[in-house]
Amino acid sequence: MQLAQRLDRISEPQTIKMAKLSRELKSQGLDVIDLSLGEPDFRTPQHICDAAVQAMADGYTKYTPVAGIPELRQAVCTKLKRDNGLDYLPENIVVSTGAKQSLANAVLSLINPGDEAIIPTPYWVTYAALVSLSEGKPIFIHCGIESDFKLSAEKLAAAITDKTRLFIFSSPCNPTGSVYTREELAALVAVFEKHPNITIISDEIYEYINYNGQHESIAQFDSIKERVVVVNGFSKGFAMTGWRLGYIAANKDLAQACEKLQAQFTSGTNSIAQRAAVAALLGDLTPSMAMVDAFKERKDYVIKNLARIDGIKINNPAGAFYAFPDISSFFGKTDGTSVMNTAEDVAMYLLHKGHVTVVDGAAFGSPNNIRISFATSMDNLIEATKRIKYALDLLK
Ligand code: PLP
């Protein structure tokens, strides 16, 4: 069968590939610890599940308005005001089948062939794929561990051309866990103020998983708010990955564009999940906060133990649930059988020698790193960090 050329512009996400490999090895009876996953290992809080059960009992099982049910669009506005001090109306909100679809709607609505989209690296895999699918050109700006993987105003200004149409970033960041402070965002905003044609997609899906307290949104800067697209969702903060729910807050024109696309793609996300989402946003946040406490304890353990391994350079993530160590000092080393030339070699070596799945940093535009998720139990993490140390210490 002849498939469309657009498929050649994207590849299967490395994260999904590693998770698949891990499942395969597990099914062969190997005791593999999977640290490749980007999903909380907690259950969705009970009151959210109860709301879904009630929706079904009420017969709430039909098509909904494409952009989301009115109660949910209003609940998103309430949340944005309560948590972020942001004023939006329901007409600014579009609810989608996951933040991934929200991002896809926004990128497809904004990028014409040949347009440039600036993406600071390390970045979440899907951003570049969506820009390429839209026939735009991703422009990567390298941000190293020395700046906590954050972008400076100088680097941003230097990357802007007259073709720049979009800027996409996440804070807290997947894969680095970096969180931009208000001052750091203000410096970027000062650059954007000089370039009114650039739209900013601010992926805030890890908002609640923040170890330092205050989350800052770039939409809080009035001078650029009209051209910021806030992307958020339920997968991480409410442990609702399988429910497939995300949303944007944006100016009305873009919201309508996303709704128009979505009307052709999905007709909107499922009715039951939307009722559950209202309960998530307006209900008790204690279970979410308890989850974050557990992530913090695990983060402290994992970072402390990885930092002790000779040859590893690591930052202390302020958010999300990943460690992103630089393992380039192992390049050129061998255990006597295989030589480590790339982060992918190290990831495969850890899988085969240590039975631990991690993700090659090249997938995030950072070929000197690997991503290690701590969204798994403390017992798994204790064992996995031991195995990683054992395997890396063998490399000479
Ligand atoms: N944005 C980032 C940075 C992510 O890490 C993820 C999921 O891994 C998403 C968006 C997509 O989330 P959702 O499950 O809502 O599609």
Image (spheres, grey):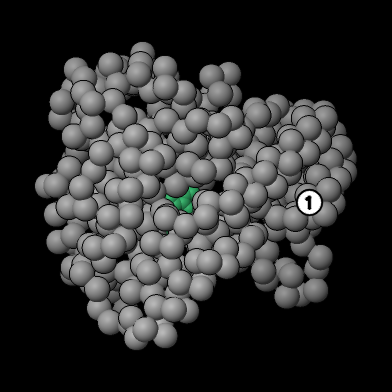
Residue 161 visible, this angle: no
Sort mark 1 into few (<14), some (14-19) or many (20+) by Cα contacts within 10 Å.
some
Q: Viewed as shown, does residue 324 lie left or right of 333? A: left
| Residue at image point 46% right, 23% down | 181
Depth check: give the residue in front, 355 or 224: 224
Label 1: state its secondary structure. Answer: helix
Task: Relative to 55, say whether 194 is above or below.
Answer: above
Instruction: Please say if 119 is above or below 378.
Output: above
Please identify the quadrant where the C terminus is shown. top right
- Residue 123 in the image: state x and y as whole percent: 46, 39
Q: Position of residue 4 (x, y in %)?
A: 26, 66
The residue at the far top in this view is 154
Instruction: Tell me which residue sits at (23%, 26%) in the image.
Output: 222
Residue 312, percent across and down?
Answer: 74, 30
> Horizontal and vertical percent for residue 112?
16, 45
Quadrant in the picture for residue 269: bottom left
Number of numbered markers: 1
Tell me which residue sits at (42%, 17%) in the image.
183
Q: Dividing the image into 4 quarters, which one contains the N terminus?
A: bottom left
Residue 94 visible, this orientation: yes
